Amino acid sequence: MQKGKVELYTDAMVREVLTDEKGMATGVLYIDKKDMKEYKIGAKVVVLAASACETARIMLNSKSKLHPNGLSNSSGVLGRYLHDSTGTDRMGFMPELVDRTRYNEDGVGGLHVYSPWWLDNKKLNFPRGYHIEYWGGMGMPSYGFGFGMDTMRKYITDEVGNPSPNGGYGPALKNDIRRMYGSMIGMSGRGESIPQYDNYCDIDPETVDKFGIPVLRFHYNWTKHEVNQAKHMHETFEEILTGMGAVLLGKKPDETTQNGLAAPGRIIHEVGTSRMGDDPKTSVLNKYAQAHECKNLFVTDAGSFVSQADKNPTWTILALSWRTSEYIIDQLKKQNI
């Protein structure tokens, strides 16, 4: 950008990757969000980094004579093995934190207090593991803070342990809210799910978005592994919270709600739709995130992942993108692409 050698196209909604008679990428076709017209941009190399699902949509919509099922999809696994992190939560009230000293806790939260996986799966009924993030404290109150005090006042007791009467308004309500500020603590589990061929996204044959581009439809179910993992999360949450002296809020979820598992996609760690691998029959990309069947096409989002640990995927996306960038430079210098 400093050398003036970058052209930046904004408000450009990419519909598909264009290819030539040899099946190689020649650029992209996009819809301008302002005038809603189609435009084409030529390119020697095309890099998709639209996020796992959107990149899969672009590639699935990029059909041609040599790519009848979507770009680099003779294996049929493009869009397959979609998976997201597992997630569930629990909250508790800490009586010992009522009326605690006020001070600035900006910055304290789930990113600073963290429990990594600590157990041996040989003794458990699910593979892999999860981490726990903690939240609460005295951050800036948001809209709705203090709602539900009619149910929380029973936890505010006097010097002999008698609960406060229900109700409250005006100065008394404000006083109760101030006393309970900073006394809530929550725990969130984020775990690894096992990639499944039958968890996938494909193109909806009947629906397009406002740009006229066919949209994705999703097919996804948690397995018994993730459901068992969520149960273990809640058992751990309760053990830790009650051990701290907390009063558990809400009810422990059961199998009727898959033990409280958040819906697929809710944790927004989608990965795996254009998985990498050495065998073109079972993967879309090679280890450099280069499409097996379109050598000048690369994917630098989480689509290339073959598994997703309990960690957030961002740093791995960045690391793989760096490696892919260096590989592209090397291949251009060697005139291989």
Image (cartoon, rainbow, N blue to C red):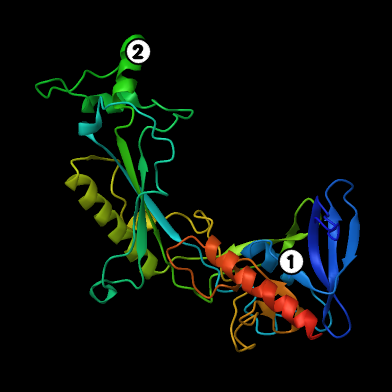
**Residue occupying image coordinates x 31% and y 57%:** 233
Q: Where on the picture, by quarter, is residue 16?
A: bottom right
Front in this rendered view, residue 336 or 53: 336
Q: Locate residue 27, reporting x and y percent.
A: 85, 70
Front in this rendered view, residue 43 or 243: 43
**Residue occupying image coordinates x 30% and y 55%:** 254
Q: Which residue is mark 2?
A: 169
User: What amino acid does circle 1 point to?
Assistant: Ile
Quadrant including the C terminus: bottom right
Quadrant including the N terminus: bottom right
Q: Where on the picture, by quarter, is residue 22?
A: bottom right
Q: Locate residue 108, reporting x and y percent.
A: 39, 41
Q: Locate residue 281, reporting x and y percent.
A: 63, 88
3D distance between C-alphas at marks 2 and 1: 55 Å
Q: Locate residue 25, reporting x and y percent.
A: 82, 76
User: What amino acid does circle 2 point to?
Assistant: Tyr
